[in-house]
Amino acid sequence: MSYARQMLGTCPVSFNVDAGLLAATIDALNDCAQACIADTGCDLSEENVAEMVRCVRLCLDCADVCVATAGVISRQAEYDPDVVTPLLQACAAICKSCGDACERHARMHEHCRICAGACRSCERACRDLLGASDRRPKHPRPTARQ
Amino acid sequence: MSYARQMLGTCPVSFNVDAGLLAATIDALNDCAQACIADTGCDLSEENVAEMVRCVRLCLDCADVCVATAGVISRQAEYDPDVVTPLLQACAAICKSCGDACERHARMHEHCRICAGACRSCERACRDLLGASDRRPKHPRPTARQ
Amino acid sequence: MSYARQMLGTCPVSFNVDAGLLAATIDALNDCAQACIADTGCDLSEENVAEMVRCVRLCLDCADVCVATAGVISRQAEYDPDVVTPLLQACAAICKSCGDACERHARMHEHCRICAGACRSCERACRDLLGASDRRPKHPRPTARQ
Amino acid sequence: MSYARQMLGTCPVSFNVDAGLLAATIDALNDCAQACIADTGCDLSEENVAEMVRCVRLCLDCADVCVATAGVISRQAEYDPDVVTPLLQACAAICKSCGDACERHARMHEHCRICAGACRSCERACRDLLGASDRRPKHPRPTARQ
């Protein structure tokens, strides 16, 4: 069981979102950040680096946005849709672009194929959490102690 | 002149957004991240720490989102509105919440007053960049070399 | 298999360190960062937050150092001992302090017990990689293409 | 006056290190991180990107270590030399390598010249803080309230 899952089960806060879904999203965000950071290093080691530039850039952006999103949803006590909704949208969008860019190199570079997979899973996880959040009650009772 | 400003002036990419505005936004994001990280440490040292908890949480989220946003807009070659627009919206929203929380402690704690100021400036900078981006041509010519 | 492990196996660079050991260290660093970020949120939700302050601080430092260390060793092409050795030492030291602080609350707060475990594993992984690096040849042949 | 400087002056903690020196180091770390993040983007836009690869890699590592170091010393309440000393050493070492790599491109690319300057200043600031820390009393009285 991932640390995200273990921690959520023992935290004195309830998030008004299914804990399993939240943990799966955090795991997907962390996996995607790790894949993008590693893929950057691999891309920069390829002979055809000039063709990898766009992929490198998008991996860097994707890692940054995944890390921030994982931080915010890991730590949340109050779920502020004005922050979390656009953040998840931005994250899904960069995962989509980065996944597309990686997929273009997937046949030639196995590391890009794997990174594309991590981006696709993370995009899906962000959209699933967005979908679940849309179904949250509009005025949830406060969940943390302040 | 800030490093953000100096670097933008010497980069082989043009961003289709006024470089001065972009540099001012990056500076505001970095200032806000620094203020929030430092304010977290100060809040945790206060006698009335139990009253500072919400402020700490929001500072942590605000720093994370500012860092990611600064990374994405510092590095950008292609301006992808599907990523940048919601990211700036999320950033403006967390700066608003965090600024409000800090302002509540502004009379009692000078560090919260200063942090509130950094959050307000950053919120404004994000909204200014969002406004400028709305006025960009819908189909900009490619700006980077790939 | 973790993404760190999958990516290392497909990268055109060889690191002069056992790939399994490297991947295990990256996984431990990412797990520890996630546990510390989540534990911060949980600590801040506890009734006795004033007693958790030192734990929160150390978790924040630990997460920062783990993230940087994971980035450097995930991306490495040249292994620069002047950077990697002190970075792993700093990381092992903060994992030790943070693990000790979390352990003090382990009976009262299950989330601190779990976080302590992640810190212990990460400390051990950093020390294992330090040990393996000590046994590397002093003048390795260059491993990346530049 | 930078936010690092303003915040340090209003924080209820005293760090046993000169506040001016600490603030100057935090500013140098943030400047260097920003320069490296921006330089990565500029390097990736250059025609001769294959020659910039090592510079890109080192900028990525340098930014990561600067961000972590700035976080730890911005937030510190207790000064733990087992963490801060090797972290500053790692940071000085990566600033040295990254500064050297950027300097090699300084004549051809103005952005590398500027980034090299930020790396040199940051290396110096880390070494100054290391020097000052060596002169700290061995058993300082506790400075934060716990």
Image: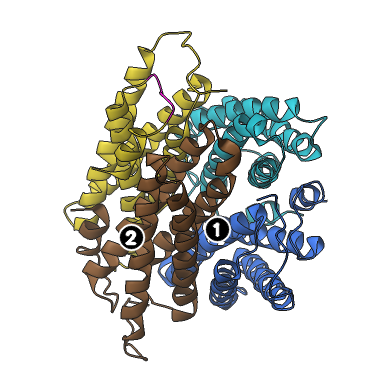
Chain colours: A brown, B blue, C yellow, D cyan
> What number is the disc on residue C28?
none
Q: Amino acid at mark 1?
A: Ala
* Residue at the image point whose x is 71% and y is 41% from the top: D46
Q: Whole-percent x and y of residue C125?
A: 29, 31
Q: Residue furthest front?
A: A107
Q: Quick check: is B130 in the magenta stretch?
A: no
Instruction: Judge left or right: residue D125 versus residue C85.
Output: right
Same chain, marks 1 and 2?
A: no
Report crowding for label 2: few under 14, some 14 to 19, many 20 or more residues within 10 A (C-alpha). Answer: many
Badge 1: how crowded within 10 Å, few (<14), some, or many (20+)? many
In the rendered view, would you say C140 is above or below A8?
A: above
Whether residue A32 can be seen here = yes
Please indicate whether residue B103 sits to the left or right of residue B23 in the image.
left
In three-dimensional space, the C-alpha distance between marks 1 and 2, rounded to whole angstroms, equals 20 Å
Q: Where C92 sits versus A59, above or below?
A: above
Q: Is B60 placed above or below C17 here? A: below
Tell me whether the residue at label 1 lies in contact with that at label 2, contact meaning CB atoms closer than 8 angstroms.
no
Q: Residue C50: tell me if it is visible.
A: no
Q: Chain of mark 1?
A: B
From the viewer's side, name the closer residue of B20 and A35: A35
Q: Which residue is mark 2?
A: A121
> B141 or B28: nearer the eye?
B141
Q: Identify the image quadrant of residue A134.
A: bottom left
Q: Quadrant of the N terminus of chain C?
A: top left
Main SS type for the magenta part? loop
Q: Position of residue D49 (x, y in %)?
A: 66, 36
Q: Amino acid at mark 2?
A: Ser
Residue extent of the magenta highlight: C12-16
Q: Which residue is mark 1?
A: B68
D93 sits to left or right of A98:
right
Q: Nearer the viewer, mark 1 or mark 2?
A: 2
